[in-house]
Every structure is written in C-alpha cells, then in structure tokens.
Amino acid sequence: MSLRQMEYLVEVVERESFTRAAEALHVTQSALSHQIKALEREVGGPLLERMTRGVRLTAMGRAYFPHAELAVRSAQQARRAALAAGGARSGELHVATVHAQAIGVLPEVCARWAREHPGVRLVLHEYATTEELAEQMARGVADMALGPPPRDWSGPVTVVGQERMVLVVPHGDPLAARESVRLAELADRPWVRCSLEPVIGGRRWLDLECERAGFTPRTAVRTQHSSTAVRMAAAGVGVLLTAAHELRGLDCAAVPTDPPWRRDITVFSRVQLNGVAAEFAAYLRASGDFGDAGN
C-alpha cells in the first residue's frame, strides 16, 4: 500500500464523497476509485461502504483509518518541517486552536504574520473544546496548537502567555462599577455556563471555587460556545466567568475576581517546532493579546 492511496482514502472520508475528493485531489473519479479498490485489496477487505448519498467507513475501515490518517498527516508535516528547516519562506502553516482563542487572540497575530510573511499561508483548525483540540493534534491535524495546557501530552508544550479571567455582567448591573468581586458574593446569582470553562484535575474550575466559597452555582443557561455565553451574560441572563480577550468589541462590563485568576495558554506540538512554526510561536509569546486584552 502506498502513502498516496492512504491520502486518497483520507480525502474521501473527510469529504464524504468520491466526487468532491476527486475534485480536491485533481484526479478523475475513476482513477480515485481504482486506487481505493487497490488499497482495499492490499488490506484484505472493504474500507468504505458506498451509499446512494456519500460514503462511510466499514468496521475494517474504522480500524484502519486512524493509522492511515496519522501517516498522511505526519508525512505532510514532515514535508513542511523540512522546507521550513531549509529556509523556505513559502507554503502553509497549520495551526489548531479552540474557538475562543481563534476569535480573541489570533486575529491581530495573524494580521501581523500576513504582513511580514506573505508567502506563508496560515490554515486554522478550530475546535469547540480543549479535549477535541488535543485529540485532533494527536491525530496530526496541524503543525502546532494554541490553547490551555493539554493533559498527558507527550510532545513539547510551551507557555506563551496567560488569559486574565473576568466576570461578565451588563453595564447596568450593580457589579459593573466594582473593582473586583469575590465569588462568595455571587451565591444567589444565576450563572451562564459554557463547555469551554477551565478544567483542573478533571473538575470545572468554577465548581471547585464556588464549592470553596460555600455554594453550588445555579445554572441559568448552558452553551457550547464561549461567544454565545458572552452574549448571554451581556444580555443579563446570568454571570459568566471567561477570558478578558473574548469581550473585545462587545458592550458589557468585565469585573476582575478577588483574588485575581489567570490561566496559562500554551503552544504544543507532536515534535519540536522549527522554521516558520517556531517563528509563529515567538509571535504568540510577544503578543500583548493575552491577559490584558480586556482592559
């Protein structure tokens, strides 16, 4: 079996279509089908179930696909790393992150990068949760990731900054004029909860801290995305704990916690970064967008 055949399989699975995969690969659909069938013969059974609308992996395909995907992604990263180490100033840099960092931290960094490295195209891969981010990085989806420290990560992890966590309320809320607020003062308040809340030791930080303050937070609404949660809190649905940089451009009040709380933001990867990937990590370390973006 060849790497090219595995690349074809990955493309078909990701696009859920032989037609769309053939277009993306710039090959004919018959040539693509021939290569997939050749791969299936070598593996010893069908990897894909061809349906009226689209395709899906068979049981054998589900067992085979993660290994094929990792091989393909690793080969792609190896080519980019070799070019970067050789001083190439063109090509692509794949960066994975969670949605909160994508909208709160990366825009200004990416704008500066585009001005100073016009030949290196950035490809962003966004995920809803830190768990999904780490899982996709382990599968080789990107050259590097930006996010909170991953758990049980075997590759390089570097702290590049910190997020300053704040409480979000509408401007008319009595808390809006405060310099800081202790969690114990919020025992009777409803909360906006989000799946991207910080997790420490397997438990959500807010639950831990509220427990220490002597109460259990009462949830008014639970969201999947931090951008939705911020807008809910700004509308007065409940109090939200979030990173200050997520409030850029929104009409709401950000109130620091007492004591103040920050969390590390890291760059992590499967192998040591070099070339343009290392340069991009340096851009992130030099960025002022962590921690102070909500001031």
Image (spheres, grey):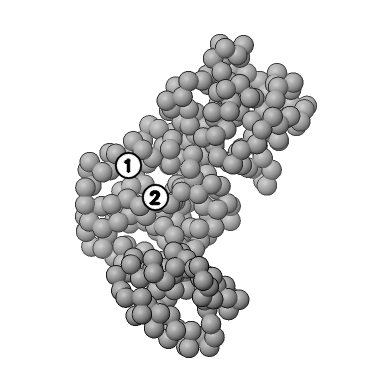
Observer-nearest of 269 and 69: 69
Q: Give the alpha-carbon distance from disc 2 to disc 1, as whole Å.
A: 10 Å
Left or right relative to 175: residue 109: left
Residue visible at 38% across and 40% down in the picture = 106
Observer-nearest of 90 and 170: 170
Q: Give the residue number, with chain letter if any, for mark 2.
A: 124
Residue visible at 37% across and 55% down in the picture = 94
Residue 159, position in %: x, y? 46, 44
Q: Give the residue number, with chain letter if any, for mark 1.
A: 110
Mark with earlier residue (2, 1): 1
Q: Is residue 287 above or below residue 258?
A: below
Residue visible at 78% across and 27% down in the picture = 214
User: Amino acid type of disc 1?
Assistant: Cys
Residue 280, position in %: x, y? 33, 47
Q: Could you tell me if the residues under marks 2 and 1 are in contact, i.e. CB atoms within 8 Å?
A: yes
Observer-nearest of 199 and 36: 36
Left or right relative to 283: residue 132: right
Asked whether the viewer can see residue 288, the reply is: yes
Q: Residues within 10 Å of mark 1 (few under 14, many from 20)?
A: some
Classify mark 1: helix, strand or loop. helix
Which label belongs to residue 38?
A: none
Residue 21, position in %: x, y? 38, 68
User: Amino acid type of disc 2?
Assistant: Leu
Q: Is residue 75 above or below residue 228?
A: below
Q: Which quarter of the image is occupied by the C terminus?
A: top left
Q: Is residue 171 above or below residue 26?
A: above
Left or right relative to 8: residue 178: right
Residue visible at 67% across and 28% down in the picture = 191
Q: Which quarter of the image is occupied by the N terminus?
A: bottom left
Q: Is residue 85 above or below residue 177?
A: below
